[in-house]
Image (cartoon, rainbow, N blue to C red):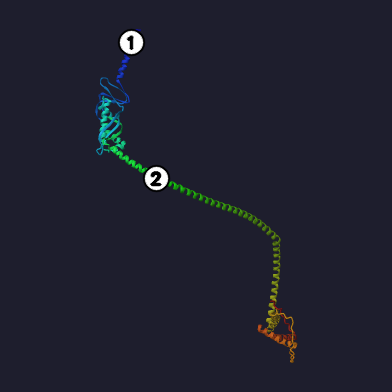
Amino acid sequence: MSTVLITGGLLALVVIFMVLIVSSLIIICPPNRVAVISGRTRTLSDGRTVGYRILRGGRTIRIPIIEKVSWMDLNTIPLEVSVSNAYSRGAIPLNVQGIANVKVSSAEGLLENAAERFLDRPTEQIGQIAKETLEANLRGVLATMSPEEVNEDRLKFSQQLINEADDDIKTLGLELDVMKIQNVTDDNQYLDSVGRRLTADVVKQARVAEAERMAEAEKAEASAREQAQIAAVQADKNIVEEQNQLRVRTAELDAVARAREAEATVAGEVARATAEQELEQQRIELERRRLEADVVMPARANLEAKQLDAQAEAARIIEDGKAQVEVFRRLTEQYQAAGDDGQRIFVLNMLPDLVDKIVSTVNNVDIDRVAVIDTGGGNGRGGIPGLMSQLPAAVVSLSEQIDAATGVDILKSMRDETSGAIEGAISGSDLPPPPPAPEH
C-alpha cells in the first residue's frame, strides 16, 4: 500500500515538473504587450538581418538556452508637455502647457524601431524621451504662428504640432494618440493686452450692436405699427372689396336666376306655342281634308264638267266660225264676181253700222224735249217749217262726213242702188241678198 502511494507521488511530481518545463517553453503574448524573442537571426521584409523576432499576440515556443524573451508594454503613456519663453512669430515669448498620449507603436516596421530603442527600458524613460521630443517640436511650431493664432485657434495649433512631431515620434517607434494645448500665457502681458483690446473692441461692438439693435427694434416697432395700420386699412379694403364682390355676385346670381326664369317662361311659351301650332296644324289638315271633301272635290268635278261644256261650246263656236268663214268666202267670191256693183252693195250693207257708230258719239246727250220757237218771219221759214227745211241739209252734211271718213258717197250709191234695183226688177236679175253686217 505504501509502495503504491510512493509511486503515485513520484508520478505526480514528474507530471508537475513536465508541466512546469513545458509552460516555461511556451510563450503566450497578450494584446497589450509585445514579446521580443532574441537568440536566432532572421531576415526582415526590408532585407535587413536581425537576431530577434517579435510576437504581437498569440503564442509561440521558445527554444531553451538559445532564445531569450523580453517584454514591451503597448499601454498609453500620458505626458505633460510644457515650454517656457518659447518665441512665437513676432519674437513674443510664450508659455504653453499641454497634454499628450503616446505609446509603443504596434505597426510593422515601427515596432522594430521601438524594440531597438526601448527594449528592457522602463516606461518612465520612454515617456521622458517622447516628452522632450514633443517639446522640441512644440517650440518649432510656435515659431511659425503668432500669439493670437496660438491662443485663438488651438485646434489648428495642435494639428500642426501633431504633423510636425509625427515623423520624429515614428522614428522612435512610438505613436502619438492625442496632443492637446491646455494653456497659453506670456510673461510680458501681451495676450492680456490683446485680450483687453479685443475686450474693448467687443464692448464697443456690443454697445454699437446694442444701439443698432435698439434702433432696429424701434424701427421694427414703427414698421410693425405701420404694417398693422396698413394691414387694418387693407383688411377694411378687402372687406369692402369682398362686400362689393358679394353684391356683384348676388346681382349676377339674381340676373342668372331671372334669366333662367325667363328662359323657363319662354320655354313654356314656346312649348305651348309649339303644341298650339301642332294642334293648329292638325286643325288645318282636318279643315283641308274637309274642304277637299266638301269644296275641292265638288269644285273639281264642276270644273271638269265646265271644262267639258267649254270644250263642247268651243267646238260649236269653231264650227260656227268655220261656217261663217265659208259664207264670207263665198260672199266675197260673189262680190268679186259682181265687180263695182258688189262693192256698192257691200258699202250699203255697212251703212247702218256706220250710222250707229256716228250716232253713238252723242249717246250721252239726253234731249228731253225740243222747243221750236216761231220767230214770226214772213218768209215762211220760221217754226216747224223752218226745222223741217233743215233736215235735207243735215242728211247731206252727214253724207259728206261719211264720204270724207270712208271715201264712199252714200247718196250716189243710194241713187245707183235704186236705179240698179229698178233695172234688176225689170230684168229679173238674181243677185244674192246682202250679207249680214259684221259683228264688232
Label 2, secondary structure: give it: helix
Q: Residue 436 versus residue 99: which sits nearer the camera?
A: 99
Viewer-proximal residue, 423 or 46? 46
Residue 53: x and y, percent?
27, 25
SS category of the residue bearing label 1 = helix
Three-letter residue code for mark 1? Thr
- N-term-proximal mark, 1 vs 2: 1
Asked whether, in this view, residue 261 is left or right of residue 416, the answer is: left
Counting the numbered discs, the total is 2
Q: Residue at x 34, y 42 (%)?
A: 205
Using the rendered view, name the quadrant where residue 293 is placed. Answer: bottom right
Quadrant containing the N terminus is top left
Q: Is residue 399 above or below residue 4?
A: below
Q: Quadrant of residue 326?
A: bottom right
In the rendered image, the vertical position of residue 381 relative to residue 110, given as above or below: below
Note whether 316 is above or below 165 in the view shown: below
Which label belongs to residue 7?
A: 1
Image coordinates for residue 393, horizontal then vertical, percent:
70, 87
Residue type highlighted by circle 2:
Glu
Q: Provide residue 406's location: percent of width, then percent of height.
A: 66, 82
Distance Cα–Cα, label 1 vs label 2: 104 Å
Residue shown at the point (31%, 14%) measured from the top left = 14
Q: Is residue 168 visible?
A: no
Q: Please tell me the numbered disc located at residue 216.
A: 2
Q: Dot 1: few (<14), some (14–19), or many (≥20) neighbours within 10 Å? A: few
Residue 196 visible from this viewpoint: yes
